[in-house]
Amino acid sequence: MAREIGASFKIRKGQLALTPIRLVWIPFSSGDWYGTDWSESITFGAFTYEPYPLTVDGLEVQDSMPTSASIKLAYSDNLMGKCEADEGGIGLTVEVLTVFHETLSDPEAYIKDRLIIQAFEFDGAIFSLSLEEGLNFSGVSLPRNHFTPYCRWDFKSPECGYTGSETFCSKTLQRCKELGNELNFGGFAFIPPGETTRII
């Protein structure tokens, strides 16, 4: 299930003008990342979320189940390193807790959303993560693209698409260009700086 609603939120809904606070957890392989859009650190449950310039769109404070959302995060060297190490985070399950300033002492006043990173963009200043509910296959890792200078396709396979007379390929982008087949190159060598890059 993508959304879990705490018992207290169901009771309090409509009784108070609540100020939402977003708590974001991303389980990078190099270490979990905890951030909040609030101006101060917030400890909720067993975890502490540090203030960070971020916005969350698509997760409305209501009972309905969201199927997609997006998170925008300001650039930092630390976050860039984590994203690069995990290929933009594609396939990771992100948890977004919506809690409320007026009820922070109540551990049951929350909305918890779990969505999968489906796409990653970086424009030189902002990381954008596109999230979707996914297929709910518990314990199954989704396929992910890899940052590598080498093509993952077998030479002359359907994915490769090359049908010429050449018999050798070094699986590099340069060789694909020599063969006029660069559009089918199956590698991701790097994220070009200063450009918007979308990985799907």
Image (cartoon, helix red, strand yellow):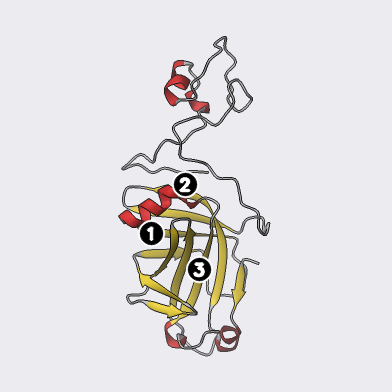
Marks 3 and 2, Cα distance to the nearest angstrom?
21 Å
Q: Nearer the viewer, residue 197 or 153?
A: 153
Residue 56, percent from left and from top: 45, 64
- The image quarter in which residue 71 lies: bottom left
- Of callouts 2 and 1, which one flags the residue occurring earlier in the amino acid sequence? 1
From the viewer's side, name the closer residue of 116 and 13: 116
Q: Residue furthest top?
A: 165
Mark 2 lies on residue: 87
Which amino acid type is shown beneath numbered disc 3?
Val
Residue at image mark 3: 96
Identify the mark at residue 73; answer none if there is no mark: 1
Q: What residue type is labelled 1?
A: Leu
Query: Which of the marked residues, 3 or 2, is nearer the chain's N terminus?
Result: 2
Q: Do the residues labelled 3 and 1 touch (CB within 8 Å)?
A: no
Quarter holding the N terminus? bottom right
Which secondary structure, mark 3? Answer: strand
177 in relation to 31, above or below: above
